[in-house]
Image: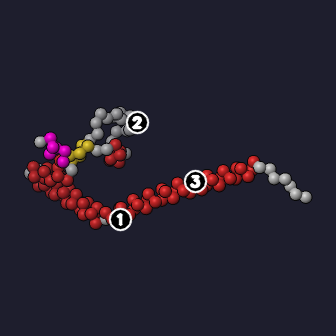
Amino acid sequence: MEENKLTLQKELSNEEYKSLRCKNFTLNENGRGQHRKYLPYVFTEYGITMLAGLLKSEVAVNVSIRIVNTFIEMRKFFMLNGQVFERLTSMEYKLLEHDKKFDEVFNQLQLEENIKQRISYPKSD
């Protein structure tokens, strides 16, 4: 049962938890409730599917179906756009490398400018 539990729910990361905070309805980060012991758990696609089979009210079943359909649409979206995401990631890495090279060039130019300022050239008459 413990192995199944791992596929039905997952613990949120700190970044995921922070992105879910709502300014109007959650406690202040600097006030009461700022220190949580554990990160919350959320259902995975498989967990929602299992939950949909357990709930019997019409509203619960309809909500569960919409959630499962949302997961399916998300999976399709990521599968169809996976190459785009890979290309964007590749471009981001290239831009980071270019930024590093530009920084090196600018640092070198600044160093050469500082050296020129230190050297006093004799004035010619």
**The magenta stretch spans residue 47:** no
Residue 25 seen: no
Q: Secondary structure under badge 1? A: helix
* Residue under pointer 1: 84
Confirm or deny contact between disc 2 and disc 1 (CB under 8 A): no
Q: In the rendering, at what x and y percent does residue 52 appear? A: 13, 53
Splitting the image into 4 quarters, where does residue 28 fall?
top left
Instruction: Tell me the magenta residue range.
Output: 2-7
Q: Which mark is residue 30?
A: 2
Residue 61 seen: yes
Q: Which dot, 3 or 2, sits closer to the camera?
A: 3
* Residue kind at label 3, given as amino acid type: Glu
Q: CA distance from mark 3 to mark 2?
A: 40 Å
Relative to residue 95, is residue 19 drawn left or right? Answer: left
Q: Which mark is residue 104?
A: 3
Q: In the rendering, at what x and y percent does residue 66 appear? A: 19, 58
